[in-house]
Amino acid sequence: MRTFILAISLLVMGLLPSLAPSQNAFEDGEWFRFRIHYGLINAGYATLGVEATTLQNKAVYHIKGYGTTTGLSRFFFKVEDHYDSYVDRSDNKPYRFVRKIDEGGHTKDKVIDFDHNLRKAYVNNRKHNTLETFDTRYNTHDMVSAFYYLRNAIDTDQLKVGDESELNMFFDEENFGFKLRFLGRDTINTKFGKVSCLKFRPLVMAGRVFKEKESLTIWVSDDQNKIPLRIKADLAVGSLKADLDAFKGLKHPFEIIY
């Protein structure tokens, strides 16, 4: 499940820092569910949902991410992961990120508050009852907010095969910079029909999670929604595949070829 969230976050790190949201690709009530396979095993599900609310008198979208293992996977390795991001409704920058996970008994419970004017991140580690302050970079995002920022900011008409771009991200207590390469346009079969896609390859660090530097591929719908349809990853042991399994509340029509 952690690999699925990492894959989504790597996808969204492909923005040039100068980009700014130009259109709204999503709205209140949007919801996705992804079915995750580890090899031939149905390993679990992950969901992402959007809810309009307020945070400290600011109009925000509360984006809720949840992942869990199922069946035999849950018997051998129980996962309950919660990711919450509160983003500004106008520019999609994150104000707060919550990560509460339990992965086979390995737990984390952290709340990160962002001050984009001062470029600071305030990390409240609720598990260990500590509060620390860290410097951040320009246009910093968390693992979840970055995906929604990308969906609004990316200009699909300007993409060329081989284009690479970057985005700053803050995760746990560290700043990260990642690259994303555009591989071109593709058409894939989904449970909903054939769909035109944008195909990306994040350049990831080999040796820790992924099999090699370029072992992750992601397909995103080539329409105004820009939703993730498929993720494939070669891991250090085995392979992972995630497919969009259900959705509701899309702002724009989901363009299916047939």
Image (cartoon, rainbow, N blue to C red):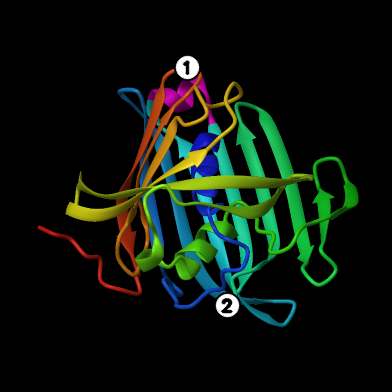
Q: Is residue 177 left or right of residue 158?
A: right
What residue does disc 1 label? 237
| Residue positioned 71% across, 63% down in the render | 96
Q: Which residue occupies the foreground of this view, 20 or 129? A: 20
| Residue positioned 67% across, 52% down in the render | 169
Looking at the rendering, the stretch of residues picked out in magenta corresponds to 72-78
Q: Is residue 122 above or below residue 79?
A: below
For label 2, count other residues whose C-alpha is less than 10 Å away and answer few (under 14), some (14-19) or many (20+): some
Nearer-N-terminus badge (2/1): 2
What label does residue 89 carry, if any? 2
Helix, strand or loop at mark 1: loop
| Residue positioned 44% across, 35% down in the render | 216
- Could you tell me the amino acid type at mark 2? Arg
Where residue 113 sits, quadrant-wise, is bottom right
- Mark 2–mark 1 Cα distance, whole angstroms, equals 40 Å
Whether the residues at callouts 2 and 1 have beta carbons within 8 Å, the answer is no
Where residue 224 sits, quadrant-wise, is bottom left
The location of residue 171, given as percent across then percent down, is: 70, 47
Q: Does 5 lie within the magenta span?
A: no
- Could you tell me the amino acid type at mark 1? Val
Q: Does 77 lie within the magenta span?
A: yes
For label 1, count other residues whose C-alpha is less than 10 Å away and answer few (under 14), some (14-19) or many (20+): few
| Residue positioned 73% across, 63% down in the render | 138
Q: In this view, does 26 lie to the left or right of 64?
A: left
